[in-house]
Amino acid sequence: MAKITSGNPVLPGWYADPELHAFQGRYYIYPTYSAPFEEQTFFEVWSSSDLTDWTRDGVGLDFVDVPWSTHRAAWAPSVAEKNGKYYMYFSAGDGAGIGVAVSDHPSGPFVDALGKPLIVDYHHGAQPIDAHAFVDDDGKAYLYWGGWRKAVMAPLSDDMTSLSGEITEITPENYVEGPFMVRDGERYVFMWSEGNWTDSTYRVAYAISDSPFGPFNRVDSILGIEPGIADGAGHHSVMRLPGTDEYVICYHRRILGDTNPHHRVTCLERFRFNVDGTMPQIGLTNTGVSAHPLFTK
Ligand code: FUB
């Protein structure tokens, strides 16, 4: 029987840094497998027809096939579609670099496109992790990334496997990692994670700009802790719910009192922007989101 709400968490087991998309009439979540770094050697792909029931499609990319990855710390995949192909940007080896892999299908298999990292240097002090690919309404694509409390960005080339412009530092106040961009009308809403991913201090904050290049001035935190339910909510993604003016935030959070740093679970919540364009405070729930079937036209 179809579920009415997703419940939280939506994926069984420990998964973090989830990126949510709607591709080809189906929803997809691309998460980090949250475990000790040596056990993080692959990226799974999960999919759903209506946001409530999630199926493990399989391993989309295995570090066995990425020799430069150092075969550990497979983190924070971000997937973008361009010209019918799907590009996965991923972090490898706790700073070994950001790679890009390509597939003909959102479930993969993804194939390492370059045979080497796309980004390996620490530009402006930013650790090369936590890439996020944002495709604007005009089809131009941008890559945002950075750990070690520094955020940078650059335009992507049309081939999606190289940068086409200068790497600019965009670090907002309190930034730690996990950058994400969403466009709401004419406004570019940039978000990131603050605090420490291993404990309850982790949270999400945002800035609004009229350009994908910034500047990004911190407005407020919007997600982090819910007394009696969960804490340490962060490293998220946001997707506009097709056919509505609502958004879904997909994030990971911690179980109250559980101090194992890798015990992170993937959850969903629905929200609307406030009428003045600011973001609301987003509560952490156990009910998750209501079913929203997605049909291909
Ligand atoms: O999941 C591994 C790392 O933890 C990510 O790259 C960080 O953003 C943090 O969520």
Image: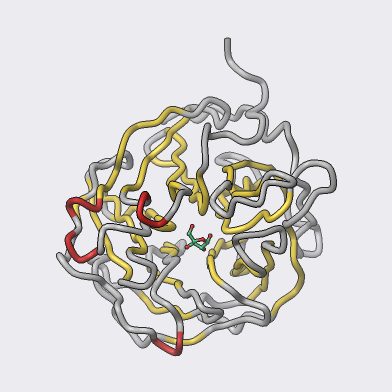
User: At 20% across and 58% down in the image, what residue appears?
Assistant: 66
Q: Is residue 204 above or below residue 86?
A: below
Horizontally, residue 25 falls left or right of residue 253, namely left
Residue at 75% of width from left, 66% of height from top? 221
> Relative to residue 85, is residue 67 depicted above or below?
below
Q: Quadrant of residue 225?
A: bottom right
Q: Is residue 107 left or right of residue 28?
A: left
- Look at the image and tell me in which quarter the C terminus lies: top left
Percent x, y of residue 172: 62, 81
Identify the residue at image location x=24%, y=53%.
63
Q: Quadrant of residue 28?
A: top left
* Side of 274 relative to 293 (left or right): right
Spot occupied by residue 257 in the image (x, y as percentages of width and height): 74, 47
Q: Position of residue 80 (x, y in %)?
A: 37, 55
Question: For this view, does 115 lie left or right of residue 109?
Answer: left
| The image quarter in which residue 38 lies | bottom left
Residue visible at 70% across and 77% down?
Answer: 218
Q: Position of residue 167 (x, y in %)?
A: 39, 85
Disc tally is 0
Q: How is the image coloured?
A: secondary structure
Q: Nearer the viewer, residue 270 or 267?
A: 267
Q: Residue furthest top?
A: 1
**Which is more toward the observer, 89 or 198?**
198
Q: Nearer the viewer, residue 64 or 248?
A: 64
Quadrant including the N terminus = top right
